[in-house]
Image: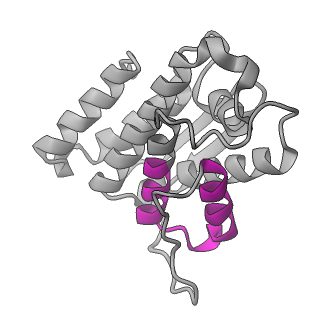
Amino acid sequence: LPCWTQTIQSNDRAYDYSLQPAASFSTHRKSPPRFSDDSTIDELVQIAHDNLDVMTPMATAALWNKISRQINRRDGRYNNHRGGRQNTKETKQIDDIFQHTMVKLGEFSTRELTQTIFSMSKITAALQKQENRRGGEAGHNRILRELLLKKDMTPNEDVFRLFAGWSMDKLEQFDARYISNLAYAYALIRFVPEFK
């Protein structure tokens, strides 16, 4: 597989990723964390960050799936950290998890890759809908918005083009259901990745 080298530009910072298919995860004493549907986003982030060294692709995909579900909850329970100055610790935790995800994409199975892209798209779409409610925006929402959206609230092309690149590398391994889910994910955020 080719090496994907990508610079991802967020609203306030840039990340350099030299992404190569890596060796399988080594054996760890700790087991990957399990994420509960009842956990808030802040709790999910804390658990993942505390166990970042054993976050397998499966656990990482599950985390983003849980975050996407919580951020789309109509009862607003996920939004347990409202307003105020952005928490530096929280910013670092989400940044670390996001970077871990992007660096490990080459190790994801087609199922894990599809789930992660689909979850990221759902998070992005939810944040776009909340554009006019920033006054009471939760801290984690602001951080995720800076990572997944540009200042004009359109998707961060670098991020979703990178996802598409890894999908292209594994295209022959995707079954029809996963391809359908990927198509829906990109349609959800109205973004069509183009390659030179």
The residue at 59%/52% (across/down) is 40
The secondary structure that most of the magenta stretch takes on is helix
In this rendering, would 191 be left or right of 5? left
**Residue 165 in sight here:** no
Position of 53 relative to 164 (above/below): below
In this rendering, would 166 be left or right of 27? left
Asked where in the image residue 21 lies, by quadrant, the reply is bottom left
Position of 13 relative to 69 (above/below): above
Magenta span includes 192? no
Q: Position of residue 181 (x, y in %)?
A: 24, 37
The residue at 52%/22% (across/down) is 157
**Residue 185 in sight here:** yes
Q: Position of residue 68 (x, y in %)?
A: 47, 41
Start and end of the magenta stretch?
Answer: 41-66
Q: Quadrant of the C terminus?
A: top left
Please tell me which residue lies in front, 65 or 71. Answer: 71
Please tell me which residue lies in front, 72 or 148. Answer: 72
Position of 23 relative to 90 (above/below): below
Q: How is the image coloured?
A: one colour
